[in-house]
Amino acid sequence: MADTWRQLQPLRVAPAWAIDMNSLYAVDPSPDTMEWFYGSVLISGHLVHNGLCFDARWEPEGDPDGCYQVDFLQLAGFPRKGTPTGVHTWLGTWTTRSRTELVAVLEEFMFTQNPPAGIVPPPPAQ
């Protein structure tokens, strides 16, 4: 178990990004590998200077028929025109069953700061 870290999924991290949590392993989901897919967050990161953030998880947790879900946010405390600094802004959620597609989307988000195509936007404010 001491070298489990060797099975972490390789990921290109853009400058100024911090990876806050990483338990995303280079293991594809199947009934035999579901123990790798428990946890409220598999990988999360944020951009230090403006608070862009992502949180990826497997939903439903431990279900081989589930999928990766990634929430994209703007963290509170980072001034943005028209946005109070005490409120997080949810940009939307994106889903996939493919680990390689997940990695590609996370890397592209970190380098371009643009959420992926197919993101489901948050519901309108009431």
Image (cartoon, rainbow, N blue to C red):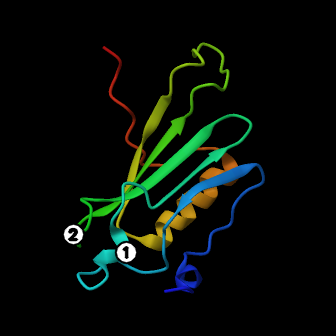
Q: Mark 2 Cα within 10 Å, few/some/many (few <14, many 20+)?
A: few
The one of 45 and 120 positioned closer to us in this rendering: 45
The amino acid type found where label 2 is placed reads Asp
Snapshot quadrant of residue 103: bottom right
Tell me the quarter of the picture where residue 5 sits.
bottom right
Q: Quadrant of the C terminus?
A: top left
Residue 13 drawn at (x, y percent): 69, 61
- Res. 116 in view: no
Q: Residue at x 42, y 45 (%)?
A: 119
Q: Residue at x 57, y 32 (%)?
A: 75
Residue 43 versus residue 27 in the image, above or below: above
Mark number displayed over residue 36: 1
Name the secondary structure under disc 1.
helix
Q: Position of residue 47 (x, y in %)?
A: 68, 44
Circle 2 SS class = loop
In the image, is residue 77 above or below residue 43? above
Residue 76 visible: yes
User: Which residue in the structure is indicated by mark 2?
Assistant: 65
User: In the picture shown, does residue 48 fall above or below 21?
Assistant: above
Direction from residue 88 to residue 125 in the image, left or right: left
Q: CA distance from mark 2 to mark 1?
A: 14 Å
